[in-house]
Amino acid sequence: MTRPWNFSAGPSALPEPVLRTAAAEMLDWHGSGMSVMEMSHRGKQFVQICSEAEADLRELMGISDDYAVMFMQGGGTAENAIVPLNLLATRPAQKADFVLTGIWSAKSYKECMRYGDAQVAATSGVAARVGGVEQGAYTWVPRPETWQVRKDASYLHCCSNETIGGVEFMNWPTPADLGAPDVPLVVDASSHFLSRPMSVDRTGMIFAGAQKNAGPAGVTIVIVRRDLIGHALPICPSAFDYANVAPEHSMFNTPPTYAIYIAGLVFKWLKQLGGLAQIEGQNIVKAEALYGYFGQTDFYRLPVHPSVQSRMNVPFFLPDPTLDAAFLQGAEARGLMQLKGHKTVGGMRASIYNAMPLAGVVALIDYLKDFERSHG
Ligand SMILES: *Cc1c(COP(=O)(O)O)cnc(C)c1O
């Protein structure tokens, strides 16, 4: 069986060795006679699977014991509520500030408004001239010097990779850099989590839905500095209170056991490859190949400012939307799947996460060239 190249933004391709291990262990995990799906989450086998997953993730990302690591549910969307419910009251003013760089950070901001005082510190949600280039809304990142962070805010939220717009923060400026050193940074890293090393110790917390780059849908990885835990608002559901979940090692209630197991296999796959610096190297090669090709042609148009083009999600436009259907049809005929852009943006989007090999990117570039030749 040849697998097609899957460019889905999420749920997305998983590393083939992970799928093969899961298939081999499906009916009988390590001589237990059981599938992982059938195990009690409190039995010693699953407790081992879960604690190994946590240990491997800590090793990969260099997460110190100052941070709790939790495997939760509800995805990035639920964290948009769970974060303010847990963090707003860490400081008396109960305020949160947001940097809006795309649809996901804008959603986080809107959700927070339901629970407290949320304010926009900076936004790229308008067209602007950036470095002499005309940019559309949510295709650039406001310069950190212009961010207005309130000094008494409980946290500053940003989305470090906007999956839909394809905008990636290459560096995370901390509130200390912005003159608000007591404001912890909260990062929604869902769609580039584990794609490169990340400075956890410069943040208050990081969260990521696994289904983009770390595993299957169903588990959300939540990394929180321990001193921020224990201040949940009274209306916070107890299953979402970090003070309940963290001490129970994600077993306050039944966690998404199979999704944690698969994410754990992904962590082991990354460790075997040599860790996050290694995968980052591969991701840079893939992104440079694709952006490098786009740089040589005027046929396709890239919406995102070159300084913040995502290595994971690459939106692009054909010269005329009437070509879109033929482009997608031709792509599928070559086994290049799920290239249609998000409906709010239109055009195309190639998501080239960790599990996409360079060969898949090369196959895409070959097709882009051929399509240009026949339609240019
Ligand atoms: C996909 C995504 C979300 C939402 O994830 P769900 O699992 O659908 O709730 C939030 N933030 C980012 C950056 C995402 O890519």
Image (cartoon, helix red, strand yellow):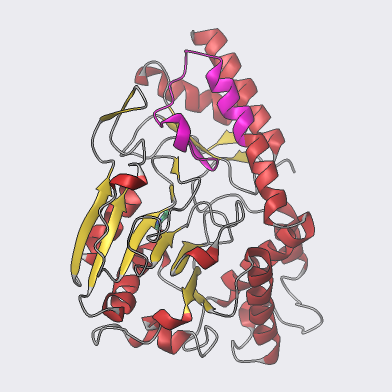
The segment highlighted magenta reads 287-314
296 sits left or right of 96 in the view: right
Quadrant location, ligand no. 1: bottom left
Does any portion of residue 90 appear in the rendered image? yes
Q: Is residue 359 above or below residue 201?
A: above
> Is 104 in the magenta?
no
Measured as percent of width and height from the top left, residue 30 is found at 80, 79
- To which quarter of the image does residue 186 belong? bottom left
From the viewer's side, name the closer residue of 356 and 92.
92
Measured as percent of width and height from the top left, residue 358 is found at 70, 36
From the viewer's side, name the closer residue of 97 and 371.
97
Measured as percent of width and height from the top left, residue 12 is found at 55, 50
Q: Residue furthest front?
A: 179
> Is 303 in the magenta?
yes
Residue found at x 44% / y 40%: 166
Residue found at x 74% / y 62%: 271
Does any portion of residue 102 appear in the rendered image? no
Q: Is residue 154 above or below residue 90?
A: above
Measured as percent of width and height from the top left, residue 268 is found at 73, 65
From the viewer's side, name the closer residue of 171 and 354.
171
167 sits left or right of 92 in the view: right
Where does the N terminus fall, quadrant-wise?
Answer: top right
Q: Residue furthest right?
A: 31
